[in-house]
Amino acid sequence: MREYTITKLTSNHIDWTIVPKLNIDNHQWLEKTDISATAQICCDDTAIYVKLTAYEKNILSRYSTQCDPVWNDSCLEFFFCPIEGDLRYFDFETNPNGASFIGFGKSNTEMLRLIKTDPCEKLLNIQTDVFDGGWSALFTIPYDFIRIIVPEFAPVSGSKIRANCYKCGDETVSPHYISWNPINFETPLFHRPQDFGTMIFE
């Protein structure tokens, strides 16, 4: 199981050049492609900040509405269990248009879908950028948002969450399923909190 330290910010400005990257590099279920991805995660006393970056030549971005099936497009994802020992998890998925598919639950079949209105979308401040050879997604997860669903969430230095980061694209030119931590399942399924890695608040 891989581990990653969530950097604690010392100012209001995020310098992404100094936030460590984790590699999303476990190609699973299909032939390996030349697509790769990274994640950077940091925090302050109010929120978790996530930057996901994909390196892929043929970007697909058809969907533009919240709760659309963005995993069929070029897609970056961050899943995490906010309480240690509790396998319920938040699921954040986005495509290059900033369309998101977000939920909370125990599995992909038992998940409450969230973020269906513009005010909630703005709350997460989802930003995307397409560049030569890839694209990135940046979003904020306020602690107050997490506590709407999990009131006991209270991260401190040294506390841990279970998490995984993904890159996929079911209907892209080169379909792919890539994860930070490997998934022990015979068919494509990212919704496996038992296979998440560990993230530690600095």
Image (spheres, rainbow, N blue to C red):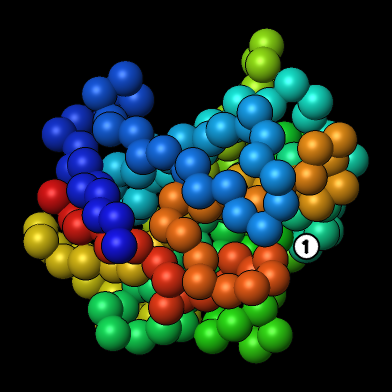
**Quadrant in which residue 87 is drawn:** bottom left
Q: Position of residue 16 (x, y in %)?
A: 34, 25
Of 73 and 174, nearer the camera is 174
Q: Is residue 197 left or right of residue 104?
A: left
| Tag 1: amino acid | Cys
Q: Is residue 46 left or right of residue 114?
A: left
Q: Is residue 60 left or right of residue 107?
A: right
Q: Height in image: 160 above or below 86?
A: above
Q: Position of residue 153 (x, y in %)?
A: 29, 75
Q: Height in image: 16 above or below 118?
A: above
Q: Height in image: 192 above or below 51?
A: below
How many numbered discs sit on the rendered protein? 1
**Quadrant in which residue 126 is drawn:** top right
Residue drawn at point x = 68 percent, y = 11 percent: 132
Q: Is residue 144 visible?
A: no
Of 21 and 201, nearer the camera is 21
Residue marked by disc 1: 67
Q: Height in image: 28 above or below 150?
A: above
Q: Quadrant of the N terminus?
A: bottom left
> As drawn, which residue projects farthest toward the top?
132
Residue drawn at point x = 78 percent, y = 29 percent: 59
Q: Position of residue 60 (x, y in %)?
A: 83, 35
Q: Position of residue 121 (x, y in %)?
A: 64, 53
> As drawn, which residue projects farthest toward the left?
157
Residue drawn at point x = 30 percent, y = 78 percent: 83
Q: Is residue 186 visible?
A: yes
Of 129 and 167, nearer the camera is 167
Q: Is residue 199 left or right of residue 31?
A: left
Residue drawn at point x = 51 percent, y = 71 percent: 184
Secondary element at image label 1: loop
